[in-house]
Image (cartoon, coloured by chain):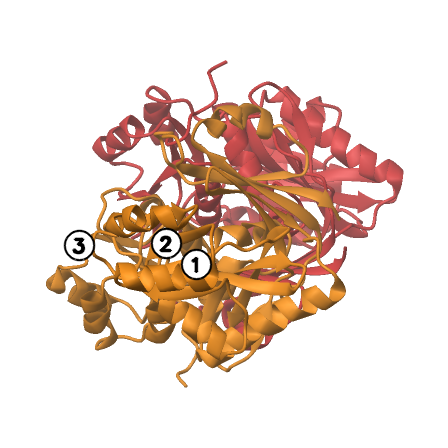
Chain colours: A red, B orange
Amino acid sequence: MSDPLPQGATIGILGGGQLGRMLSVAAARLGFRCHVYEPMANPPAAHVADVVTTAGYDDAEALRAFAASVDVITYEFENIPTAALDLLESLRPIRPNRRALAISQDRIAEKDFLTDLGLTTAPYAAVSTLADLEAAMARIGTPAILKTTRLGYDGKGQARLRSGKDAATALSAMNGADAVLEGFVNFSHEVSVIAARGLDGSVACYDPGENVHRDGILHTTTIPARLTNAQRTDAVLLAARILNALDYVGVMGVELFVTAEGLLVNEIAPRVHNSGHWTQNGCAVDQFEQHIRAVAGWPLGDGGRYADVTMENLIGDDVLRLPEIAREPQAALHLYGKTEARPGRKMGHVNRITRR
Amino acid sequence: MSDPLPQGATIGILGGGQLGRMLSVAAARLGFRCHVYEPMANPPAAHVADVVTTAGYDDAEALRAFAASVDVITYEFENIPTAALDLLESLRPIRPNRRALAISQDRIAEKDFLTDLGLTTAPYAAVSTLADLEAAMARIGTPAILKTTRLGYDGKGQARLRSGKDAATALSAMNGADAVLEGFVNFSHEVSVIAARGLDGSVACYDPGENVHRDGILHTTTIPARLTNAQRTDAVLLAARILNALDYVGVMGVELFVTAEGLLVNEIAPRVHNSGHWTQNGCAVDQFEQHIRAVAGWPLGDGGRYADVTMENLIGDDVLRLPEIAREPQAALHLYGKTEARPGRKMGHVNRITRR
């Protein structure tokens, strides 16, 4: 185990979106500098990072220079090309580690991993051929959803299957990529646990939040979530089991479905998570600082919750409401510096304190 | 009155120390970019600002380019050379305005202004000659303190006078600069009010904090301060009177002495203030965001206090205690990214929540 990073050390961040931006600010608050690596010009994180490299993940020279300039590497998204990771890992530690990334990049590996841990997921089956798909549907039933196994850069193929008649069409939508059939889950609501694990193996979880999606995008996270005490304990224990099994270092978002039969893991994200933004105004140490503390080898901070919070994402034209939101009492704004408000684009979020 | 600054607008900040750093982060949180102007290389604000200009205040070309690149100009310190301000003001609005700067740069102008407003200060008299000084001592008495009128870049001449015998020595310590004799004040403790005024004339004050100094440097600020309800009201009302009289836009720190005869104004600082750092962990909108909201023409935010806080400055070798402080529950660290811990140097601060 290495020593904690000292004041003035540099943290490399792969990805320059709003998560990289808020990680950069948290790192600065702990006295670190950030070097952001991002293929797109002028990303949100560039406004607050010490250094920005604009280069692709296939640019070995830029990747080498980036690694040489930083003390540790972390990331804000999971779909980083493997070759880039191979190169970077040979030069500097990557936290969270490659195994967490590999699992979260592959829906079947993720579900196998979770199932092997004794956790419950939606029923699933690997599908390559029409025969696979028909066998899977016979077991899992319909409705179901067919998804490509890997979350590549090339679009995410997904197809709903209402009945056996949809099989051939759905399979062709995968464009020959390996796929996974997932059964639908009858859940009452979705919650997520933002969990952190330090380099020393200590684990800290934030109180679970309850997520509401709109048009497939997270709309609100409300804390506390509707959970029984037993469910709350379950949620935290299963998150800790995942982190320990991966020898994980950093913050992870664990999405859970609440069903009559218990909690079921929807997916894991090996990074800070949109459903953890409420921690910025509900905890002494928020998810961004917690992640930086972990990857810097610092002790985890106090993630105890001191308020009830509802986080609302500001998507696209929601920013037109900024003048009113700016006047609301007990509302904390977090904007990402994006000037163009396209539909579906996350422009910022507001944390509303509903009870202290 | 101009429109509120839109997302992506740029705020120019004169001075790149920790105050400029924390202003930059607050501005980013509201979706603004920052351009920091600072003569010294690699200042703390550079790690989090979008653009940094390293140039002197006598570099007209650099000042012009800076002004051309920003939408509004603010500052983190009050001793900005007049010629630089003249040039900048001809190109972009400066907030807070020049009058606040002029008054805070001149101890006699400040005390005259406060006295004209009906506020109480320490007894004082302008001193140019030995005859002035002797007359002033006859009126004010000893002990007293002789200070240069202006807070220039060239060191701050101060000399204590225990008795009339010290007069000639004290005057010579002024090096021919105009000076002010200030009587000692018998006060029980010092408090400060962090007050804000928006472009629309609205005023919001944070709850007063109680300051303890050590070796002439702020050591702790504790909220709430020991004040009667009447004193608390007085403190807020007198701060509002100062801001309104100056048609002030932004955050001001008002230091007050608590005496048996009431509150007495020690000094005003036309900027965010070290004694207001506690607001980062005690209020939905902290002093840095409040200042940015004001200079950007936004509505002032909710400065209501939701916790008792003690802010401790981490000076010089205090950073050696970071490993322990990082483990404290309910302690929020704010470090400035300075790698060399010189004696007396402000390296960061910690806000400890003592009650919610």
Are the numbered discs 1 and 3 placed on the same chain, yes or no? yes
Question: How far apart are labels 1 and 2 at the CA level?
Answer: 6 Å
Are the numbered discs 3 and 2 placed on the same chain, yes or no? yes
Q: Residue B182, labelled with which disc? A: 1
Mark 1 vs 2: CB contact within 8 A: yes
Question: How far apart are labels 1 and 3 at the CA level?
Answer: 33 Å
* First of labels 1, 2 by sequence position: 2
Asked if residue A337 shows in the view, the reply is no
Q: Quadrant of residue A262?
A: top right
Tag 3 secondary structure: loop
Residue at the outermost bottom position: B1
Image check: B251 left or right of B108? right
- To which chain does the residue with label 3 belong? B
Question: How far apart are labels 3 and 2 at the CA level?
Answer: 30 Å
Q: Which residue is mark 3?
A: B56
Q: Is residue B253 above or below residue B45?
A: below
Q: Position of residue A237 (x, y in %)?
A: 76, 29
Asked if residue A112 shows in the view, the reply is yes
* First of labels 3, 2 by sequence position: 3
Tag 2 secondary structure: strand
Query: Which is more toward the observer, A252 or B37?
Result: B37
Name the residue at 54% across, 77% down.
Answer: B118
Q: Is residue B320 above or below residue A257?
A: above
Query: Which is more toward the observer, A206 or A235?
Result: A206
Question: Closer to the observer: label 1 or label 3?
Answer: 1
- To which chain does the residue with label 1 belong? B
- To which chain does the residue with label 2 belong? B
